[in-house]
Amino acid sequence: MRRETQNILLLLLGGALLKIAITGDYLRYVKPAHQPWLLAGGAVTVALGAVAIVRDVLAARRRAVEEPGHEHHHPARSAWLLMVPVLAVFLVAPPALGSDSVTRTRGGTAEGFAPAGPGASFPPLPQGDPLPLTVTDFVSRAGWDEARSVDGRTVSLTGFVVHDERETLLARLVIGCCAADAYPVRVRLDGGHAAALPADTWVRVTGKVVPGLNTADSGYIPALTVGTLQEVPAPKDPYEY
């Protein structure tokens, strides 16, 4: 690959990093805490590419003066194809992980989701219903909270619809660092009209846990008796942590 192509790739790569960091699209790939590193990395990459281009332009001008008639070679067209993936980030941002990632995880505990164990201690929940909880917190409390803090409570959960065999699930994906290590947490929906909604539809549901179902036999997937169900826009940050 010629230097000209390398330098332009540096500019495009740095620009792509800056774009996703500024627009918020980076939340489809990594945690919010990584934004400063993406901004810094993008800025440095753009600066390196710009400096290299200016240096090569000045060098070419000197050669033109010192060596009149010097023959210049153009980079092979195939080298420019390397820019296509980087340009794609500018034009089409890949979507966040969704129902396909959830349905690929079947049976048993989702990889990365460690049961809290019997007798686990959880902070007390505030008063008032419906009680907003993350799907991760709800699943953990439904299975391992010795105080049974969610039993009898009306909770509010937000996630996307997953159709898995004969079941309809509410799911979220949890990441520790980036989308590459994502694993799902799921809740079976009992009632409501979620079964009629397309997969990946984001909804907010309220309802009550069905006691005693979040066990190893159920794959640590609790069930929720749905009271209300409302479609909502997909959040800017689609993951839980």
Image (spheres, grey):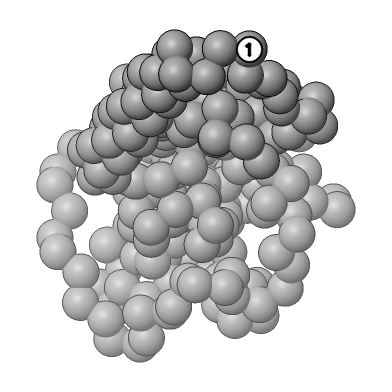
Residue 122, position as x, y percentages in the image: 20, 69
Residue drawn at the location 44% of the way across and 53% of the way down: 178
Above-or-below relation of 160 to 140: above
Q: Is residue 27 left or right of residue 75?
A: left
Residue 162, position as x, y percentages in the image: 70, 42
Residue drawn at the location 80% of the way across and 25% of the way down: 77
Locate residue 50: give its quadrant. top left
Which is nearer the eye, 237 or 197? 237
Task: Residue lying at the far bottom in this picture: please name it.
Answer: 118
Describe the element under mark 1 as helix, strand or loop.
loop
Q: Is residue 168 left or right of residue 113?
A: right
Q: Is residue 234 visible?
A: no
Q: Is residue 103 left or right of residue 40?
A: right
Above-or-below relation of 64 to 45: above
Q: Is residue 45 visible?
A: yes
Residue 85, position as x, y percentages in the image: 67, 32
Above-or-below relation of 160 to 137: above
Locate residue 68: give its quadrant. top right
User: Local crowd at mark 1 within 10 Å, few (<14), some, or many (≥20)?
Assistant: few
Residue drawn at the location 30% of the way across and 40% of the way down: 41
Type of the residue with mark 1: Gly
Residue drawn at the location 85% of the way across and 51% of the way down: 166
**Image mark count:** 1
Residue 97, position as x, y percentages in the image: 61, 42
Q: State the residue position of label 1.
A: 69
Q: Quadrant of the N terminus?
A: top right
Task: Residue lying at the far right in this picture: please name it.
Answer: 165
Q: Is residue 9 left or right of residue 237?
A: right
